Image (spheres, rainbow, N blue to C red):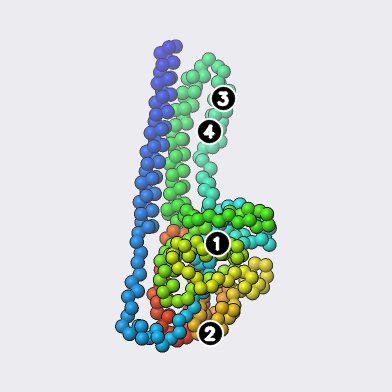
Amino acid sequence: MLVVHQISCFCNRSYVLIRELVSIVVYGCFLVIKSFVRSLNQSAVTYDDTPLLKSKQRLKKVKRKILVLDLDETLIHSTAKNAIKNQNRIVTQNTANSSSDDKFKLNNLPFKNLRRRWQQNRLKQTNESYSSGLSLMYKIFELPFQVFDIMLSLGNMLSTRFVNRNVTPPDFQLDLMIQREKIEFLVRKRPHVDLFLKKVAKWYDLVVFTASLEMYGSEVCDMLERDSGIKFKAKYYRQHCVQENPQSFTKDLKIISNDMANIFIIDNSPNAYKLSPDNAIPIKSFVGAANDDHLLGLLPMLDCLRFCSDVRNILCRN
């Protein structure tokens, strides 16, 4: 019996050692892959805006234009950590439909019922004399499943975070008190938004026009101004929109400027600019994708649009 006990202790220790080694190796591989993908995402991006021949003379002949920017799903994407039950208190344009990508859930592990029955049988044998032998047998049986669980969790995480690339860490968090209820927002900046704002601030007067509440929009604007080093000329919020129904808001650019030849908006929602479709540049909604590059794709067009005398002559063909 002593020999059997010693063999059982040795096997138990070997089992724990193997399990820990597998966990360390798998976690190390995960960290290496994560650092590699992060280095790819953070590669330096530049845009050459060297003035062309006679560009300064042309700019002197045309009026400096106003670029109106939307916030939610255009420059940033935010999700509420705690659910907002009252639909009348929607803070952002898309809070009610915010994705649940901030909570990562693993798939159901395989052979769940079989393993549960083995564990129940193991508990029934704990008070019997030969429980040490059965315990060793159960541990040997569970070891491959635990290794597979680790590999499965790693595969799910890599697939969710790096293959689909729809889960990126938030850039900052906002805590707002709305009708005595604390709402926490995780805000993600659109990739390259700082570079985008720095470039277009040289070419246009930047104005923010969002359908979000002012208490939320002003905080987001302050964060964008701090990170990019620019200043918005003006900021307009939900109270400045034309509200058709509780969840539909239209933006009238004439409250910013009556000179419709020198003002245009970038927005992801066609309903927002339906009053002036010839003064709008649509953009795909940003929902957190780390490989999004739509702002970079707009820079060449915006670089050229500042030279025209009437933006509607160009944007009406969009």
Q: What amino acid type should be assigned to the residue bearing mark 2?
A: Asp
* Residue at the image point whose x is 35% and y is 51% from the top: 36
Q: What amino acid type should be assigned to the residue bearing mark 1?
A: Glu
- Which numbered mark, 1 or 2, is in the foreground of this view? 1
- Which numbered mark, 4 or 1, is in the foreground of this view? 1
Residue designated by label 2: 259
Q: What amino acid type should be assigned to the residue bearing mark 4?
A: Arg
| Nearer-the-camera pick, 176 or 269 | 176
- Which numbered mark, 3 or 2, is in the foreground of this view? 2
- Which numbered mark, 1 or 3, is in the foreground of this view? 1
| Residue projecting furthest to the left | 53
Q: Image check: 116 left or right of 21?
A: right
Q: What amino acid type should be assigned to the residue bearing mark 3?
A: Leu
- Which numbered mark, 4 or 2, is in the foreground of this view? 2
For the residues labelled 3 and 4, the Cα–Cα distance comes to: 13 Å
* Residue at the image point whose x is 39% and y is 37% from the top: 24
Residue designated by label 3: 123
| Residue projecting furthest to the bottom | 61
* Residue at the image point whose x is 60% and y is 60% from the top: 95
Label 3 vs 2, first from the N-terminus: 3
Residue 86: name its quadrant.
Answer: bottom right
